[in-house]
Structures are given as C-alpha cells and as structure tokens.
Amino acid sequence: MSFSEQDLERYARHIVLREVGGVGQAKLRAARVLVIGAGGLGSPVVLYLAAAGVGTLGIVDYDAVSLSNLQRQIAHRTADIGRLKTQSAADAVHALNPHVAVEAHTLRLKADNALDLILRYDIVADGSDNFATRFLIADACFFAKKTLVSAAVSEFSGQLATYKPEGRPCYRCLFAEPPPPGTARPCTEAGVLGAAAGVMGTLQALEIIKEITGAGESMAGRLLIYEALQTRFRTIKLPPDPACRLCGPNPSIVDLSGHA
C-alpha cells in the first residue's frame, strides 16, 4: 500500500516510530473501526482515530447535540446544537482528515441490529453511557468475534479494558449482570468532569491504535482505573470468571435474545 507525499507528511510522526512505521500506518488506513456513542468518550475517540489515519470510521448515535453536551463532547460545536451527533461528528472528522471515510449510523443499537452492524467492522469502541447498551455491545462483540475496547467515566474517575475474541476474560467476567435499576446514577445526576472523559476517550483511542498496529502490550486481561482528583492510574489483573454465563465452559447466554 503506497503513500502519497501528503500522506507521508501528514503521518510523518507515526512513520518514524519503529513500533508503527509504514507498515503500521498502512494497517491503520485499512482498518474499519466502529465507535458506539459520539459523546464524551466517543468524541476524542473519533478525532484521534481520524487524525491517526484510520481508513473507515463507523459512528453510532441517535441523539442530537445539546448545549449541555459541549462541556465534554469535543467533536461538536455551539453551531451544531440541534444537529444529529452522527452528522456533527462526521463533519469534525472530515475537517480534520478528509481522507477518512465515515459511515454514520443514526440509530439506537438493539438486539436485532447490533450483531449485523458490528460484523461489518474490525474493532469496536464502546463509548455508550448506559449499562443496557454496554452489555449488548459486549455480548454482540463476543458472538461476532470482534475486539472490544471499552471505557467508562463518571464524575472524576474512569475505567478502561480490552476484550479480545480469541480469549478470556470477557466483559461479563467483570460485570456479570447490569446493576438493578436506580442503583447507578446517570451523568445527568452524578455529573462528569469534561476533561476526565477526554482522558478516558484518548486512552481508548490509543488502545485501538495499538490493537490495529500491534504496537506495545494489549490491555486484554487487565483493567485500568483512573482517578482524576488524585491524578492516579491503577492497573489490576482481570481474571476469567469460571462461572461466566457468556464465556465460561457452560454458558447460558448463547445469543442476544435476552436483550430488549
């Protein structure tokens, strides 16, 4: 795969990295990444992946931009208020890197469309903001055999993990079931520091780039915890759950029929 003179200049700081180089940059250009959620996490993900030269970005969201989004959702501008987030994010990507193809999916992810959509891509970034969608994405990626890079943020803290199709653990090894309704406060009630969402979304984009290029060590099997008020990162081992209902030896979840 050849690069034009403009490509060589645009991606020069990648290409001189021994761990990336021209081969890694070509892998980025050939990659198809699905970003689910164009909000506080998805915004830095799509912008950094576009800047990195990922060839095709799928963006899933069904919401419109509101004024309260702009404190953290940096893919959108004040002039975008009222526009669909998929449209606004696509414009931001093209303004940054016109060579990236954007596939906008303005829809709510459900059990009847998740698997078909995820199968079209190489790797998935979960930037959703509710547990129902997170579990649906995790289960669908497991059945589609796609790598999932999942991040979450609330108030001043965040979590990040990568789940690979060829091994355990899976997302349900960490969270077996969604929490009971009403026990986890949404960010509209709990709040979230905008820059903390930016940190986690940037780390998410970084892990996706590593997975595509093969650079460094994968986060698979580990959970990263970020605490912004203490400026502290902790990484803990994430062991497989021998009784996991999804990836265990005797799974009881065999399809997406349990999702609404």
Image: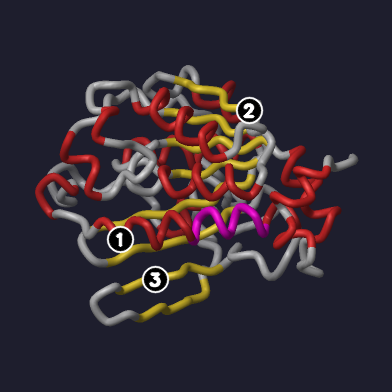
Foreground mark, 3 or 1, reads 1
Asked which secondary structure carries label 3, the reply is: strand
Boundaries of the magenta span: 203-210
- Taking the view exactly as shown, the residue that stands out farthest to the right is 2
CA–CA distance between discs 3 and 2?
32 Å
* Circle 1: residue type: Ala
Marked residue nearer the N-terminal end (1 or 2):
2
Asked if residue 26 is positioned above or below residue 159 in the image, the reply reads above
- Using the image, tell me which numbered label, if any, was put on residue 225: 3
Location of the N terminus by quadrant is top right
Q: Mark 1 packing: few (<14 Cα in 10 Å), some, or many (20+)?
A: some
Q: Mark 2 packing: few (<14 Cα in 10 Å), some, or many (20+)?
A: some
Residue 141 in the image, given as x and y percentages of width and height: 57, 39
Residue 173 in the image, given as x and y percentages of width and height: 48, 57
CA–CA distance between discs 3 and 1?
15 Å
Q: Is residue 208 magenta?
A: yes
Lateral position of residue 184 relative to residue 202, left or right: left
CA–CA distance between discs 1 and 2?
27 Å
Q: Which residue is mark 2?
A: 101
Asked if residue 134 is positioned above or below residue 256 in the image, the reply reads below
Lateral position of residue 123 relative to residue 64, left or right: right
Residue 192 in the image, given as x and y percentages of width and height: 21, 56
- Using the image, tell me which numbered label, if any, was put on residue 195: 1
Asked which secondary structure carries label 1, the reply is: helix
Q: Is 248 or 192 nearer to us in this picture? A: 192
Q: Mark 3 packing: few (<14 Cα in 10 Å), some, or many (20+)?
A: many
Marked residue nearer the N-terminal end (3 or 2):
2
Lateral position of residue 239 relative to residue 234, left or right: right
Q: Residue at x 47, y 76 (%)?
A: 236
For residue 194, which quarter of the picture? bottom left
